[in-house]
Image: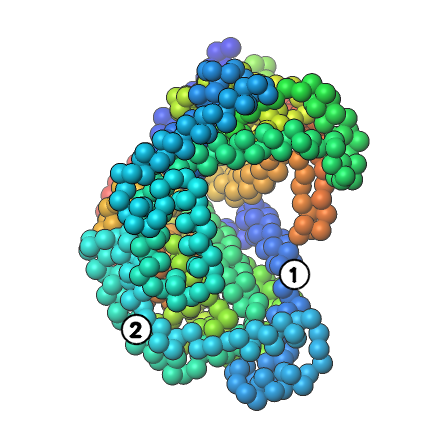
Amino acid sequence: MTLLGYEWRKLARMPALWVFVALCLLFNIFYVSSAGYNRRLVNETSQTAARLGSRVDAAFLEGLSAMDRTKNQDLLLTGCRELTDVFAFYDTAGLTESYRYWLGDSLAGRWIGWKYELLSPRAAHLSQSGASMDLYAGPATANAHSFLFGDLMRFILGEAAILGMLSTLALLGHEEIHRTTQTVCASRTGRRLFRWKLGAGVAAAMALYLAVAAVTLGTYFALFDYSGIWNSSISSGFNQLTDMLIPRPVLTWADFTVGGYLAAVLALGAVLTAVLALLAGFVWVVIRRVYLAALVLMVVCLGGLVVPSVLAELDMWTAYALCTFEPVIVLLNPVGWFTEQGMNAFIPWQETAVTASWLALLGGGTAALLKRMDRKDVPA
Amino acid sequence: MRLFWQEMRKIWRPGILAFIVLLGAMFYWVRPDYYREYYNGGLSGGNHEIYHLSAEWAEKYGTTMEQSEREELDLQLAEEKEIFSRMLADIPEAADAEFTDYEGFVAFIEIHHNAYRGDESYHAGELFTQRERLIRRVQGGTNYGRIEDLDTFLFRYDHFLESPASARENFHTVYTPQEQARILELEARDQRGYLPSGLKTATSLYFRYLAFWNALGVILLLAPFLVRDRMRRVRSMQWASRTGCRTLAVQMAAGSASALLFSILSAAVYSALFLVNGMLVFKDFPLYSPVMGGYTWFDMTYGQYIFALIGLALAAGLIAGALTLFLSYYSGNYVAILLKAVPLYLALWMTLNELESGILFFHWTYLLNGALRLRWPKGLDLALFVLLLAAGWGLCLWTCVRQRRREL
């Protein structure tokens, strides 16, 4: 534990790190404050839900009609009157058909067909549970959901990924930077130090992620009142997601309330940050040069975006499907986590499976490489 | 000079350069390539056909379209419609759907769209799919896009003649006095350029991405440069001799020269890839094209516009270079400079995006979620570029002067 403390102290003494964190927070707060255009509608909807409940039924409509009329209440009332059960008779075969237009009869096309077949009972279940008739944020739902879980979470994850990767590189490369590698590696305990460094880097990455998320989401929830809608289902009929220009209701692999979904997204985000910090560790152990490792990480991350797009353009859909099993694709689409995700996922719970398998792969791989490093001569 | 070349060798390290080139190739694929391909015949659509039509007219009528020449286009439109009818004869489903000419096809599309808007069951039915398929087949298998673009062009040309901006009621409220004076000057000249507006947009965006890339590439190239000396503790050694005392100034010069060289090399690659599309046909076209819209502050041709955009991209590289050198000098290790480089790049990206959006044209910026519209007066965007460059070099100069006064 003392070693861990020393490593964290090294990070804490880096002014650039704190300046970067401060800039990230400033940017996030500015971005949150720029979303004021539907704030009043979300807040009024939440207050209405606190009074009348978050299920849109006859009693709710009656209560809403009896309330004082404002422009937003009128909008809400109209929206609620038009709300229908979007999952009743919802056929996921329509989505399969749409994707088959691009994927054809390739393996990827068959996988996506299999995925939507598995989703069919979920649509029936969501219809039965009445999730579609939940209020969530009323007519502002789709915008508020994509702002919070799409844009804002993507920023938080991106910033945490950069912080996590650079913190891990800073710790692992500290001896190289200060030319103390040979001294440290002169003893067995010294060589084991790199394991501590990796652990400290991953823990720091997760801590920084939680700190950035806490301040950003704290600001968001100080401006947007969610008190009445935490228990609403995210599969509300007001909500929808779009992929390949096809809008569809939010089909999740399990039932999620707004609060539950936020907790799940934050938890997976923390693990994903750890995965990216481990990736930085893995690359450093292979290359052993901080700046070059950072460039390789950039290439790997940008490559994670470019390669699938090249493969899609070349109609190599099976290879494209395999490429979606990597952490950068997961990181860029938090709004789709735990849902069907369209062309970004080919198996149920793909984001969770990808994050868990990369955690195991990179954890095991880096540990094995570090063990190998114990037996290697230190380059002069 | 020997010192300068030694510093250049420290900057241009093959390993780092290889990764930057790889990143550059991926960056090109992600964005700028789209704007290049859009005019390469790769995609069909309105902008694609007007590009071909304008290129043909350039050979026949020159860089402006006079009234007498415009009248010849009515004949061309009639000819194109005849060609359409002949091509339509090869599609038997068209006759089944009861249209045999261009007007009939346009009416068919309108009926289809009206039915689509009013009736959801129509959208889900077999008839909808059949009609959609037929429309796509006709649009793809005939000169439909060409006729559509020619028709739009003629409408715009006539509309411009009938109602020039200065004759509109809102002329004095929409434009600032400076803009009004420029519009009146341009209208008095009656120079009827017809450079396709989509081409201007694509060119501006393509070279804006060059500016973004120059900033990124230069930051990555120069970020480790001065940090390395500090990490290896050679600064004190440099101070041991009179020549060594001048090292920082030489390093700043080598860094700026490298930023310029990198930007020139990138610009050469970007320009070559862009110009092989046949863009040179338009090089003498006046940038101000009343038929296609957009007022320019300066009298220049499309070729000069490309040069101006390349110049701005080089300036972006130099600004990024100067600021990176400054930050690199004050960084203790690679991670510290990378933590500064990320916000620096994002700040430059946002600034360049704002400055270059509509540069040399009348343009405005929306602030406070669109509540405030800020009009850019003539030359302010260019002045800000110069100011940023001066600020970057000023910081480098200040660092050199400060270093000379410091005790090591």
Residue matched to label 2: A120
Disc 2 versus disc 1: nearer the observer: 2
Q: Chain of mark 1?
A: A
Eyeballing the image, is A64 above or below A102? below
Q: Is residue A181 left or right of residue A117?
A: right
Residue matched to label 1: A36
Q: Amino acid at mark 2?
A: Ser
- The secondary structure type at the circle numbered 2 is helix
Nearer the observer, B284 or B402 = B284
- Classify mark 2: residues with Cα within 10 Å, few (<14), some (14-19) or many (20+): some
Outermost bottom residue? A59
Image quadrant in which you'd find residue A244: bottom left
The first of marks 2 and 1 along the sequence is 1
Residue B21 visible at all: no
Q: Position of residue B380 (x, y in %)?
A: 71, 30
Image quadrant in which you'd find residue A94: bottom left
Nearer the observer, B259 or B197 = B197
- The secondary structure type at the circle numbered 1 is helix
Q: Position of residue A334 (x, y in %)?
A: 43, 60
Outermost top residue? B1
- How many tags in the picture? 2
Which quadrant: the N terminus of chain A? bottom left
Residue that appears at 68% across and 38% down: B364
Residue that appears at 42% across and 61% down: A247
Residue that appears at 30% across and 76% down: A121
Q: Amino acid at mark 1?
A: Gly
Nearer the observer, B49 or A192 = B49
